Image: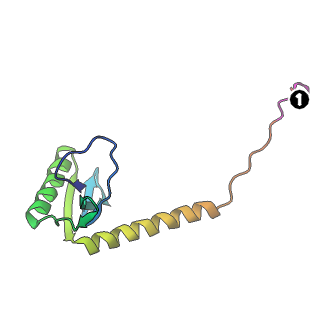
Amino acid sequence: MVLLDEPLALGSVVEVELAAVIEATQESEGETTRNDRLVGVVPEAHGSLRTRPLQPSAKILDGIRKFFVAYNRMQGRKFLPLARKGPEGARALLAQGMARWRGRHRASRERPRPTRTARSTSRASR
């Protein structure tokens, strides 16, 4: 989720700094999965000067947590927040996810690919 002062056009690409993470699990149809939520903010830019973005307050993060709980309840799921961490926790979680993704993709590149058997398409073989 990206926090902004003003709306952006659909498809906009913006630089985001991680501000927080809400670690949580989600239960649906008897199955529990991890479903953490990263919260980012867009750095303020004034010409060539760049200032640090304001960090979301505890009140804002609590509102985001309540939103996800209510939204999942309406969808028939249970969203259970476990912890709330700041920028360092968000960056660590992102790094773990990236490492896990790289490991999966590295393993898929190392697996031997099935060979295709050539089928004859000539009229003589029919």
Q: Nearer the viewer, residue 2 or 38?
A: 2
Q: Residue furthest front?
A: 47
Rendered location of residue 18, percent (x, y): 28, 65
Q: What residue is drawn where x is 89% and y is 29%? A: 125
Q: Judge left or right: residue 124 versus residue 72.
A: right
Provide the residue designation for mark 1. 125
Q: What residue is drawn where x is 18% and y is 48%? A: 6
Q: Can residue 69 be seen at all in this image of the molecule?
A: yes
Q: Can residue 41 be seen at all in this image of the molecule?
A: no
Query: In the rendered view of the protein, which quadrant contains the C terminus?
Result: top right
Quarter holding residue 38 = bottom left
| Above or below, comparing residue 29 to residue 87 in the picture | above
| Above or below, comparing residue 124 to residue 9 in the picture | above
Rendered location of residue 50, percent (x, y): 25, 65
Q: Which residues are magenta?
A: 120-125
Rendered location of residue 67, percent (x, y): 15, 52
Q: What residue is drawn where x is 16% and y is 65%? A: 54
Q: Nearer the viewer, residue 42 or 77?
A: 42
Quarter holding residue 57 = bottom left
Q: Judge left or right: residue 38 versus residue 101.
A: left
Rendered location of residue 45, percent (x, y): 24, 59
Q: Is residue 103 magenta?
A: no
| Above or below, comparing residue 35 to residue 103 in the picture | above
Q: Nearer the viewer, residue 45 or 60?
A: 45
Q: What residue is drawn where x is 11% and y is 57%? A: 63
